[in-house]
Image: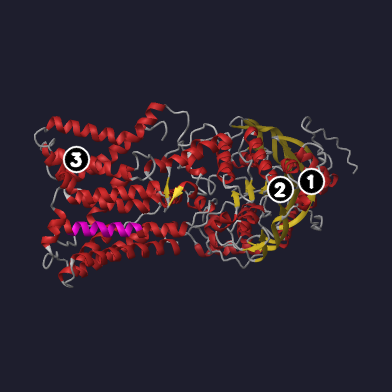
Amino acid sequence: MTSTTRPVSGATGRRQSGSLLNLERLGPYGLIVLLTLEIVVFSIWAPDTFLTWVNFRAVALNQVILGLLVLAMLVPLIAGELDASLPAVLTVSSLTSASLMSNGHLSLVPSIVAAIVLATLIGTVNGLVVVRLGVGSLVTTLGTFTVLTGLITGLAGGRTITEGLPKETMRRLAEPRPLGLPLPVLYLLVVAVGVWFVTEHTTIGRQWQAIGSSEPAARMAGVRTQRLRILAFTAGGFLAGVAGCVQLIKAQLGSPNIGPGLLFPAFAAAFLGATAFRPGRFNVRGALTAIALLSLGVVGLIMVGAPYWVDQIFNGGALIASLFLVRYLRRDVA
Amino acid sequence: MDHELSVSPGTSRLSIDQHAGPSEAADDDRLLDIDGLCKTLGRNMVLNGVSMTVRAGEVHALMGGNGAGKSTLIKCLSGYWRADAGTILVDGSPLEPAAKKIAFVQQDLGLIADLNVVENTCLGRGFETGRLGRIRWRREADRVHELLADLGHPDIDPLAMASTLDPVERTVVAIARATQSLREGVRLLVLDEPTAALPVDEAQRLFETILRLRASGVGMLYVSHHIGQVLDLADRISVLRDGELVETAPASSMTDSHLITTMLGREVESLQREASSEVSTSPTVLELDLVCGPRVNDITFDVRAGEIVGLAGLQGAGCTEVAELIFGAAALRSGTIAFRGEAVRFSHPADAVAAGIALVTEDRHGDGSFLDLTVGENIVAADLRRFARFRALSARRERAEVAGLIDRFGISPAQGNRRFGTLSGGNQQKAIMAKWMRLQPHLLICDQPDVGVDIGAKQAIYATIRELAEGGSAVLVISNQFDDLAELCDRVVVLRDGRVAAVLAGTELTEHEISKASVSRRSLAVEAAP
């Protein structure tokens, strides 16, 4: 699995020393340069609509769920594992807490806690299967993804759960805008800081990175790799559970359709983000920058008159183009 | 020892072809005629004007140390490399690899794990097909079965996947594939270390096959490290050293010690070692008693505090396996390992590291380092607690520690945030040494610490090892550089075929003695072919 979960620049790159220093230094910030360019261009092109606080706030709010999902996927990715089931875990979490409130008449907090515990357990099971049975993580989690998609349909009967939810409480958790930012955006930022800190500034995060780079080497350096890999899946499940609950609170409904469509955008953001800040490695700052780059691009294009279906074309095209550009910026070190 | 061949190492190339053993043959019987073969790889002249012949009905052995050029020579024959200069004639006409006039048993056997025996056997040859190009599987399977039965292995299922075969069966399949082309008119066979994975009786069976082939007029080029086997089996022996053919002579005129001297290129003088009396009384740090594990049996030796012990052996002798057993990376089958006076049974390298054992692995890039991480991250990978409080890392203390270690071990360029993969081999190895030295281990095991590093880095690494031993730690060094082991170590344990063959110390501890003990000298009692 390691080879397919490597970030692009690490997988194909064979770097050489003796590089041109300025380009090497610019490389990690290529994505930031692109984002800045994009904002400048659309600000000039559509100053009245694009360059407004309302626009940026709306874009941010729209990307909260994708952002949380990407954070969930990043943890296993950093440890060299790919958990494709996390979008479905997100949906399961959202629907579980919704139906506990709607059908089980539980209040908000216990429902959310139960949903997150369930999501965490699913992550652990994925981890156990992958690590203990030695099955590839992509295959295993695609299997889990399919099973969970079936369960989702069973849970909700294919319907959206709107009845019996404590809408008033949810609204209070979703709508206020302290510091001008909607609460869900703050949730995302808090989780992002947490994941960033754990993955880049703790021993566990460092060991995940070591495993992601070379599991045999990590083992021979005295890292208990099996445990830590399972833990990475567990953490991914937990974060996807959190994402599901934020989705429920934000939308005030539990929908069976929210998660699965996010799989590929989340992938794109994680891989694109691996070209920035810490080139060749999946990282939180890069992934969030990538989400901003892609979402602002789509919004900008629509504002200057592009048709609605430009969304997917831009996302896909931008992913490929950015990879090329970043590779070009780092051609000496790539 | 009374051979009249005057070998003046390194300078002259002798070519003594006149008494060619049982198959005295005329010149036009030459199946293979190599003349003035040169090959440069990178900046190294790997083959320098090599000339040799293989006659019909002859086993011509090719010997030489690691890096002597044997593999390159064979790769020139197989067409993998194109020679820079010189000619290769097969049956009198220039070599055309595509014509498949040479059969090979490659060193790694060249089997494809996910194909079955029939597919592997027929890949290079093509399949017999029926109507519409359908492969006649049944007929091909029968034919392969017959080939295998001829080699004494009717039990190998032609439809078994190569990955499910054991090493002996795999070797047999590779040999069957080669003998199949011999049946189809090929008269020249190249065998590269065919007995590497074979136990004695299987090797014996292979030799019978070889002798049968020889009697039928097949010429064979036989590459091997096993001096004993070669002396028994070959008609003529050629020795390569540093890319030059230094001697060709009838096997009957050779002795094992003469061969070793010729391969090494010099009479190795015994370095008088200072008997360090403190060492012999210092406490035992590591003690192995009848340790058995994967591919090693009944290993018994000890290492004392302040002592540097070498572990020597040819490829596959079991040195790396012993290191992995001590380090908890492989499962102990029986026997006991005592570390600092207590019996231990590490189930994971983490336990060994926690106990104070460090292992510099043989495969630097496979399991020794993180190429994508930075130099600093590599150096601190084995212990992060030192600058962590409640698992949160202090970047400042980490940087300071990394900078100090880079300076102390002379890692260049001196940048902790550089990607590890961009360092040269020598500096990578220094960084790996730094990673373990930082832990001040009670026992340091270095598996081939000098492979692919330049002389300066090698000296730095050896200095580090000495320094650690002087500080009272125990060191176990595995190396193919027997001369370096003789110089560096207090004692050397020589392994052969997974067992301890000798323990050398004092005046016995010379490169020559290590070489001698490491090669198999079983007499095979091979009957001379009629």
Between B328 and B307, the residue placed more toward the observer is B307
Q: Quadrant of the C terminus of chain A?
A: top left
Disc 3: which residue: A296
Q: Main secondary structure of the magenta part?
A: helix
Disc 1: which residue: B276
Q: Report if residue B319 lies within the magenta region.
A: no
Q: Amino acid at mark 2?
A: Gly
Residues at discs 3 and 1 both on one chain: no
- Label 2: chain letter: B
In the current view of this chain or complex, which residue is farthest to the bottom? Answer: A104
In the rendered view, would you say B408 is above or below B288? above
Q: Quadrant of the N terminus of chain A?
A: bottom left
In the current view of this chain or complex, which residue is farthest to the right? Answer: B2
Q: In screen coordinates, is B446 left or right of B23?
A: left
Is tag 2's residue or tag 1's residue first in the polypeptide sequence? 1
Residue B264 spot, x, y in % from top left: 76, 39
Q: In screen coordinates, is B186 left or right of B162?
A: right
Q: Amino acid at mark 1?
A: Ser
Q: Which residues are magenta?
A: A235-248
Residue A71 spot, x, y in % from top left: 30, 51
Image disc number at residue B306: 2
Residue B43 spot, x, y in % from top left: 60, 29
**Disc 2 packing (10 Å; few <14; some 14–19; many ≥20):** many
Q: Amino acid at mark 3?
A: Leu
